[in-house]
Image (cartoon, rainbow, N blue to C red):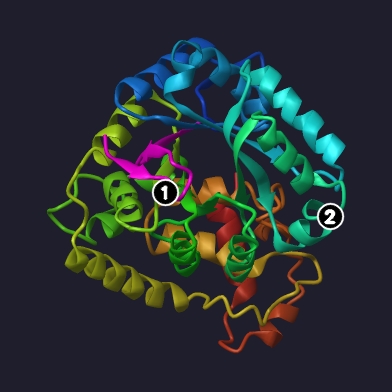
Amino acid sequence: MQYREFGKTGAKISTLGFGAMRLPSNEVNGKTVYDYDESIKMIHRAYELGVNYFDTAPYYCDGESESIMGKAIKGFRDKIYLSTKNPIEDASGVNWRKRLEKSLKNLDTDYIDFYHMWGISWDDYIQKIDVKDGPMEAALKAKRDGVIKHICFSFHDKPENLFKLIDTGNFETVLCQYNLLDRSNEAAIDHAESQGLGVVIMGPVGGGRLGAPSQTIANVLPGKINSSAEIALRFVISNPGVTTALSGMSSMKMVEENAKIASNSSPLTIDEIKQINASMEENKKMADLYCTGCNYCMPCPHEVNIPLNFQLMNYHRVYGITDYARGEYAQIGKVDWMKGKNAESCTDCGICEDLCPQKLEIRKQLKETASVLGE
């Protein structure tokens, strides 16, 4: 396993982090039951393979992830770095501390190494976090008390707001999305590194979905890569601004494969990265034939997020990663960073087509999207 300096925190962490949001489960009488034994075995195996950064959150796995993680790391708590998150539900520092105490209890630990303001936006920071008697004051006190070691944040807002949060000077690490298909945070990642923040990447292989076989992605570096998962993960960790790639792993096989890839001490070369970027740019041009994401069709009077629906359809149509596209499609309207409604909510009104500068057959494409990506 490779290790990197985590910003200015003094920690040195593995280039692969274990994400505990997709732990194995089974359906029993229509109810999801999480497999504690297999999950713990996976966490132990990741540790054996050199992973020392483990990430969870209060609501992962129907609220069971923290408890599973706490049980799993009992034998080596002082040898790993533990990360979890605090949902900023209000501007109260007192309530923020209550949520922290609950996580400490769930994890059965006295301290959390990297504690995140969870999925915050710039508006959250201004209105709820950096306010009198608010979460930031509570976090600074918790750090003085030794209950948390480092104040961090995770992010799903617009890239320009990531710069603003970095520049507050109040955070030591950032957790954000970055992968082959979404490089919108690339410049902000460089900025974070220049300001001494550690950078953790979520979704480097889309929770494993980007690892599904795709001839389009495999052809990016023909003959040099064994799988789509390998190129996706190596692309992320080849970025010098990235400290670790956090993979939400749901099987022992995924743990073994990701650890093997992250242990490769030969990063992609500059020429290989240029080749990847050029190939992905060509694919983007093909995707733009279906939708450029200009947003002139928005807002839809029926709240259909047209550009997002078409972006996911292009993941299927252009890149051949249909499982990933379907998984993301199912999340539209269910998570804060995927607002609006999916294609099935289209009423065929046609207003969007009058506004589209490319004169796309939007209604027809939405029907196709619903048919391919919907249940």
Question: Which percent across, then down, holds residue 119?
Answer: 66, 49
Q: Residue at x 67, y 19 (%)?
A: 106
Say which quadrant the C terminus sits in.
top right
Q: Residue 274 at x, y = what percent?
A: 24, 70
Q: Which mark is residue 131?
A: 2
- Quadrant location of the N terminus? top left
Q: Nearer the viewer, residue 132 or 200?
A: 132
Please tell me which of labels 2 and 1 falls first in the chain.
Answer: 2
Residue 231 appears anywhere in the view: yes
Q: Could you give the CA–CA distance between mark 2 and mark 1, rounded to whole angstroms?
A: 33 Å
Please report the bounds of the magenta region as a residue range: 1-19
Q: Amino acid at mark 2?
A: Val
Mark 1, secondary structure of its residue: loop
- Find residue 364 and report its horizontal and vertical position in percent: 60, 70
Is 132 in the magenta? Answer: no
Residue at the extreme front? 144
Does the magenta segment cover residue 3? yes
Work out whether residue 219 or residue 262 is closer to the camera in this orientation and state it: 262
Residue 330, how many percent across, how many down?
A: 62, 47
Neighbour tally class for label 1: few under 14, some 14-19, many 20 plus, Cα within 10 Å? many
Q: Residue at x 38, y 39 (%)?
A: 12
Q: Which residue is mark 1?
A: 204
